[in-house]
Amino acid sequence: MVYHDLRSFLKVLEEEGQLVRIKEEVNPEPDIAAAGRAAANMKNGPAVLFEKVRGYKYPVVTNVHGSWANHALMMGMDKTASTKEQFHELNRRWDLYPVEPKVLSRSEAKCKENEITEDINLFDLLALYRINDQDGGFFLSKASVITGDPEFPDDFDKMNVGTYRIQIKDKDRVGIQALAFHDIAVQLEKAEAEGKNLPICIALGNDPITTFMASTPIAYNQSEYKFVGALNNGEPAEIVKSDLFDHLYVPAHAEVILEGEIISRLRTVEGPFGEFPGSYSGCRLQCEIQIKKITHRTNPIFENLYLGIPWTEIDYLMALNTSVPLYKTLKETMPEVQAVNAMYTHGIGVIISTRCRYGGYGKAVAFRLLSTPHGMPYSKVVIVVDEFVDPFNLEQVMWAITTRVKPSKDVAVIPNCPGMPLDPSSNPAGMHDKLIIDATTPVPPEPNPRETQLLTPPAGFEKWDEIIRGLLK
Amino acid sequence: MNCPRCDHDVIKTIAKSPVGEVWEVYCCQKCWYSWRSTETPRILAKFLLDDAKIAAMQTIPPVPPLKK
Ligand SMILES: [Zn+2]
């Protein structure tokens, strides 16, 4: 099952019992955010669609990606697929890159059903609301932002599709956070050095894989749209040319497309905003976008997400897409590595399962992770477990830590390394210590004076797994 | 009406509810704080702003020098 728009995915979520509709009128604050928090707290929580928000015309949906069941359905898998199964399937599809996207004509693209060029008013189309109480305004927390490289406008692969927080500052003007290490900042710098505005499109309410890919860190010259096709198992992404900018392409069936420009060399107060580490990031002087045109589907659905203390919806958008690239990097030189779980706060916490080729190998795997481009600044707590431990099963990981670790030799702290500035325990911001916990079983030449015989599952347990799962359906 | 965050007195009404006359949204033209008329902003002391705080804010991303 491949989804080319948000609506077809919402339909399947509903059929699978993974979407609930709120038919009664709700208040924009605090109801929408509160429901997002509540749904995220539930195991396999559903998407929540509010049909009627007080004062607004159109519906809003939240928590669309907010559970492993929804994540599995996004991938076209059974909603009971385990996290590890989803990891390996994503890893397989990753290698299908690149899949050329299909460029549709304007008349084939549903995002062009309606257009607005005068009296632009975001509030007419989007049920905007405050997400966290101390946020400085209403934010788009789940927008896919499309920009090009001003130096190479015709280089399709350098076009960037990314998720950036966007603050509403007027009915046709918004702020955007472009951190210096983000791809969009590279493009903005080139435009601003020439004193030019940077053309930008903001796509809201996309098919679920496009949104997932927009929040996936990939190389600057890799194309998110070509990855969308790969992650959809070879089915090309459907895109269409922007109305205002010939070098930008947008998801063809998005609910709403905002087109405009980042105003050159202007910075105004932005924030605070409740961020993914579970705390507010404060006010800074950031960029502004003037919206010049909107195209949208008839009766558009506004999709947005709640972020709070993990886990909330945003954590599913930086879980397996952080884990798979790290796994691929490790696997190149250390084929013994079985799986990588880098799902904790964007890879600040990582669990790796590996076979150990010789004594000390577990620690060596951790060092390798800590020297990758993402692991170097982000990863702080690295736990290494044996190949038979599922790193996505925290009960198993805790078993490994409680029965395999001798702290005096298996726990190491490496002081004064690169750190992730948004981690509030990083001090000064950008510096941190690294913690390695080697929970693997010692192999020679390391002595293992109290060798154990592991328990094995009774014969026929796979058959029973199938029977029990079948009965639960 | 003054801004609940920086006390500035230039406040723009940026939206009125598209359906019914049930709320308006205001935005401070100095610190860009915005709120709905149905909300009662209770801004924590640490998030209140004044000129000194705004002047000391980090610029993200930095504005590059103009190429000649
Ligand atoms: Zn203000």
Image (spheres, coloured by chain):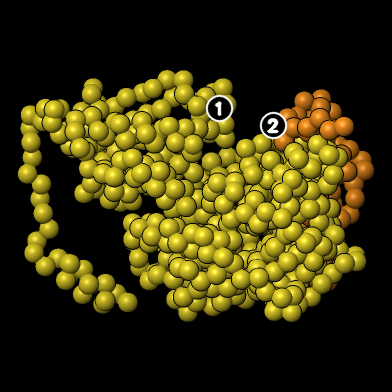
The answer to whether residue A284 shows anywhere in this view is no
- Residue A136 versus residue B57: which sits nearer the camera? B57
Question: Pointer 1 indicates a residue of which chain?
Answer: A
**Amino acid type at mark 1:** Gly
The chain letter corresponding to orange is: B
Q: Using the image, determine if residue A393 lies above or below residue A26.
A: above
Residue at numbered disc 2: B46
Any mark on residue A311, and which?
A: none
Q: Which amino acid is tagged 2?
A: Lys
Q: Which residue corresponds to the image point at 58% horizontal and 73% vertical from the top-left?
A: A4
Q: Position of residue A416 (x, y in %)?
A: 46, 20
Q: Is residue A17 toward the left or the right of residue B43 in the image?
A: left
Figure quadrant of the C terminus of chain A: bottom left
Give the SS element for disc 2: helix
Local secondary structure at mark 1: loop
What residue is shown with label 1? A430
In space, the residues marked 2 and 1 are separated at their CA atoms by: 23 Å
Q: For chain A, give the colour.
A: yellow
- Res. A122 image quadrant: bottom right
The residue positioned 69% from the left and 64% from the top of the image is A250
Residue A242: horizontal and vertical position, in percent?
A: 75, 64
| Residue A358 visible within the image | yes
Residue at the (59%, 46%) spot, across then down: A220
